[in-house]
Image (cartoon, grey):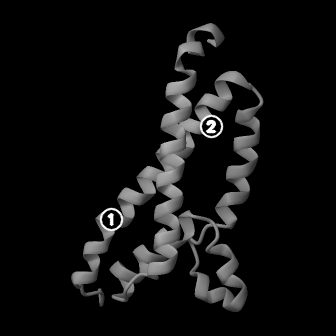
Amino acid sequence: CGVQPTLLALWAPVLIALMLMLVTGAAIIFAVGNLFLRDVKYIVEVVLTFAIFFTPVLYEVRMLGDMGHWLLLNPLAPLLEGLGAAVVRGEPPPLPWIGYSAVFALLTLAFAGWLFSRLEGLFADYV
């Protein structure tokens, strides 16, 4: 196959955990929003459709040259790039961008937890 795992592959669980934190936080926020504002599900569909093109899953950021760094503002993009760098290419992930994504994921999950606990008493009234 030509790909040899290195010690950098140990970044994979860390990056996957950060992805899970980010996605869980976003899912809770959108679920609470959808409960109180029924139009949120339509907005989420449109946002996810466009987000697919702004997240480097089928391409690498470096393929886009200098403009590719703008895509790294998407907090999921550095995690995917780091996963590709560490596991596939055997390079260290871009730590400043991973830090940015980690802070964003932690803040998203913390805000989602706060929002959920603050509004959960109203859930039965709106269901």
* Amino acid type of the residue tagged 1 in the rendering: Val
Give left or right: position of 119 versus 14: right
* Amino acid type of the residue tagged 2 in the rendering: Phe
Q: Position of residue 30 (x, y in %)?
A: 62, 37
The residue under the point 57% across, 64% down is 75
Q: Is residue 22 above or below residue 85?
A: above
Query: Which of the two labelled residues, at mark 2 and mark 1, occupies the earlier sequence position?
Result: 1
- The mark tally for this picture is 2
Between 71 and 5, the residue placed more toward the observer is 71
**Please, what secondary structure does the residue beneath circle 2 have?**
helix
Q: Position of residue 8 (x, y in %)?
A: 28, 82
Q: Can you tell which mark lies on residue 30?
A: 2
Between 52 and 10, the residue placed more toward the observer is 10
Q: Can you tell which mark lies on residue 14?
A: 1
Q: Are marks 2 and 1 in contact (CB under 8 Å)?
A: no
Q: Is residue 58 above or below residue 108?
A: below
- Quadrant position of the N terminus in the picture: bottom left
The residue under the point 67% across, 51% down is 48
Q: Quadrant of residue 59?
A: bottom right
Crowd band around label 1 with a 10 angstrom C-alpha radius: few (<14), some (14–19), many (20+) = some
The residue under the point 68% across, 91% down is 65
Q: Is residue 25 above or below residue 100?
A: above
Q: Quadrant of residue 69?
A: bottom right
Give left or right: position of 86 versus 74: left
Could you give the CA–CA distance between mark 2 and mark 1, rounded to whole angstroms? 24 Å
